[in-house]
Image (cartoon, helix red, strand yellow):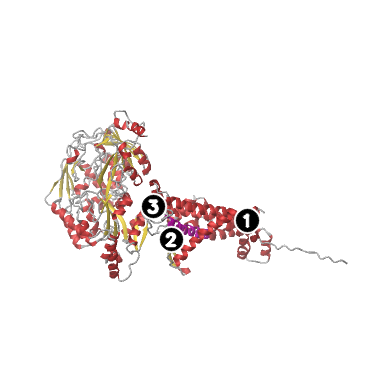
Amino acid sequence: MSLMRYCRDKDILTTRSATAILSGFIPFVLLITSGCDLSGNQADSNTTTIYGAYTAKVRGLDPGDIGDTTSTIVASQMIECLYQYHYLKRPYELIPCLAESMPSVSSDGLTYTIKIKKGVYFADDACFENGKGRELATDDFVFAWKRIADIKYLSKNWWIFDNRIVGLDEFREYTKTCKKAADVDYTRNIEGLQTPDKYTLVIKLKKPWPQIIYLLAHLPTAPMAKEAVEYYSKDIINHPVGTGPYKLKRWYRGSFIEMVKNPSFRDKYYPAEGEASDSEQGFLSDAGKKLPLNDRVILVLVQETPPLWFLFMQGKIDVSGIPKDNFAEAIDLSGGLTLAMKDRNIRLLTFRDPSTYWVGFNMEDEVLSKNLPLRKAISCAVDRDKYIELFTNNRSEPAYGIIPPLMKTYNPDIKKISGISYNPQKAIKLVKEAEKIHGSKLPKLTLSMPGTDAVLRQYGDFFKQCFSQVGLEIEIDYTDWPTFQNKIKTKSVQLFSLGWIGDYPDTENFLQLFYSKNKSPGPNNFNYSNSEFDRLYEQVCVMADSAERDALYRKAEEMMVKDCPAVFLGHGVAYILVHDWLYNTKPHAFAYGLSQYRRVDTAKRASYDKLLRKLK
Amino acid sequence: MNKTKEKITVTKGRSYWTDSMRQLRRRRLAMCSLAVIVLYLVIVLFIYVAQWTSFDVTFLDWGQKVGEGYEAPSKNAIFGTDFLGRSVFRKTLYGAKISITVAFWASVISLAIGVPLGAAAGYFRGFIDDIVVWLYTTLSSIPYILLILAFALVLRGKTLNLEWLGLGRVELSGIATVYLAIGLTSWVGICRLIRGEVMKHKERDYILAAQSYGCSSSRIIFRHLIPNVFHLIIISFSLRFVGFIQAEVILSFLGLGEKNSPSWGAMIDAARLDLPKGYWWEMTAATVAIFLISLALNIFGDALRDSLDPKLKVQ
């Protein structure tokens, strides 16, 4: 999945990186949209429906085993976590969702006490007695987390808790001794997960872990009703049972998903504060209104971008990314909307992605590892602006470091510090220097690409041209994703093309990619090792949020970029088009559970057909 | 006695091949097609020779930037440029090398498998025939493209041990994977054809004579039978060549072909992304190149069949 991926689970991690590279420059992701007219589905004229489109199949809606972005976004409309991101405030801020308040943390940073809201009910479901949802209790969190630890369950989300909570790893070891899944005793006490009463959860950590707060806003840590697991068993992936604003009504795999308002949803209101400009932009017009602001959400699967674009232009879909091929149709040379879009009253939203893309160096490779001038030469040979123009329609910012501009720790001077810029003459000089270090003519380098499709072949051709103009020979190795993944894990790549989309707004999530203990098969695919960086990383990643921590994060990044372990290429910028009948569409980099805030003007939507006829 | 000298006109006999070639030469369209085919072959040979001799020929340097990205056809770049400003014309020429090489080796491989197997099955019959028929029936029951894809995927990245031939270990990648995949999956047609023809010839007098002389089976097959069905092999070669070029295009389009140099399939695949933006020239160049060679091969193949097949011979 693209958002929320951490450092432990190697498979998940690399999958995540793939998502970054494969979807990063085509920010055509699932958007909760409206307008796709599934005629006959409208309950009545007073029902407001949010229609959506998603481009990848939903694999399952069991939060404990959820691992892809699409499934997470869909499930997050129905399932909630302890915490959530504030919809309007920037920089991104966590606020309580199922929790009553932010956690109370002990002075040593090891014990988290969390009170949950009273009167929160699971949505009515056949798994409960009389089909009536029961009240949420802290035991539901403990059950959900034990389930993730249970080896028999084979959750892909164990990385979240691995070596974190006192007693949970032992519970996992115990489950390995059980012969069958049914033999696992979920009543076993775990020292680090205590529930002194129905509404209090005490988490004891093995070592300080300030990032836990972000993980508690991540869908796999959502509570799970034991009744649902027992009732649906393996079919639970098709029956999400949560406390969220919607509940699942119908799901036709490969077609559409319909969610309706959860009648037992607690009183939750649209935020009354946000950024200074929010009021002016109308994002506070619905402040204080009870959520959700609509009755139904329908998400349609449209896997190809041409029909999705067609649906959007026909007003059947309210919100859409801009496919690469339709960019010129939507955006003019000045970066604004074209007349055709303006005539349709379409609005343009842009926002920065928490993402970075690069061509990485394997720092254990014989040729590259001891040759800093060679790495710098390669970095100076790549024309980032051209790359961004060719492959992203200028929907990226050039990158010279790992931390994206979205993060508060972003260093605007990183380009100067790294000493890297597109400069073929400098690159040629550096290549000569590199040849002296190497002792002979540099051998042909190999750049591995994570796929074989036409777009990646174009990437490959581009890099080939950049390299050849400074006298470097390069062969592009196009491999399918599993082969690529295997090569990365076994450190058998030389140069490789990848990217990373931040899981949460903490710089640690980016810097962990360079921590030596995370070397391949871990997330440090560069196999970068710098003891000074490691020391700094270990110090900073357990610190609470502070100005001092931010300064240390910047210092760590500076240290890393000077060693040039990658050609940093770009940071993504998302472009989204919205029809004028959809309100409260403030872009969000961690866009989970946002349907509840959207409001639809059905009259405006109905008049769109007339507008189209008029335009013809 | 009046001796009158009787003048005897001796007409020199023409061999089967001479006769056939004479007929073929009379067909103008076939000759034009042959010229097109020869032109393609000359280009390919020239590219190979230039590569082997490290001869620097500008118009073959497809990686060179000749203008801005996506330049429409002009004097500077007659087929326009691609997204990186490389000449589409040069890429098209270079693409011929990949396609023709693949088609040639795939044909050789498929004939090398299909002809001996078909001849053995037709000549020996019995158990050998059963095995061969079972093998090709099984193979032909799998959809062709799926079979090629499966072979291409399995062969990709594999290493071929040719140490016993003194060639060491050969890594299968790009073009080698493609022609192996195509060749290994497309011998069924020719095998079936040769089998039937050999069965027919086996009963003829010249074979009985060879058998009476005590010729060995291998001698009969390779010295008597195969030369007599060789016209079928030639016809099949020319007609299947087109199919192999198209198979290479499909494999390259699906990302299983040659990736580090341009091929027509890869050009079409890349142009697929450009077409909606109005950049039609790369797609056009590749499809026209394929169209011309396919048309020429088809016309020439048909003419060849008409000339070589005794049943279809037209005086």
Q: Give the position of the N terminus of chain B as an image quadrant.
A: bottom right
Total residue callouts: 3
Residue A360, given in percent of the width and then of the height, sits at: 29, 58
Q: Is residue A547 left or right of residue A241?
A: left
Residue identified by numbered label 1: B26
Q: What residue did someone put label 2 on? A: B59
> Which numbered disc, 3 or 1, marks the residue that appears first in the sequence?
1
Secondary structure at badge 2 equals helix
Q: Chain of mark 3?
A: B
Can I make out residue B17 in this image? yes
Judged from the image, the secondary structure of the residue bearing numbered disc 3 is loop
Q: Secondary structure at mark 1?
A: helix
Task: Confirm whether circles 3 and 1 share one chain.
Answer: yes
* Residue at which label 3 appears: B71
Q: Is residue A9 magenta?
A: no
Q: Main secondary structure of the magenta part?
A: helix
Question: Are the two marked residues, 1 and 2, in contact with CB atoms closer than 8 angstroms?
Answer: no
* Chain of the residue displaying label 2: B
Q: Amino acid at mark 1?
A: Arg
- What is the magenta range? B88-110
Q: Is residue A24 above or below residue B175?
A: above
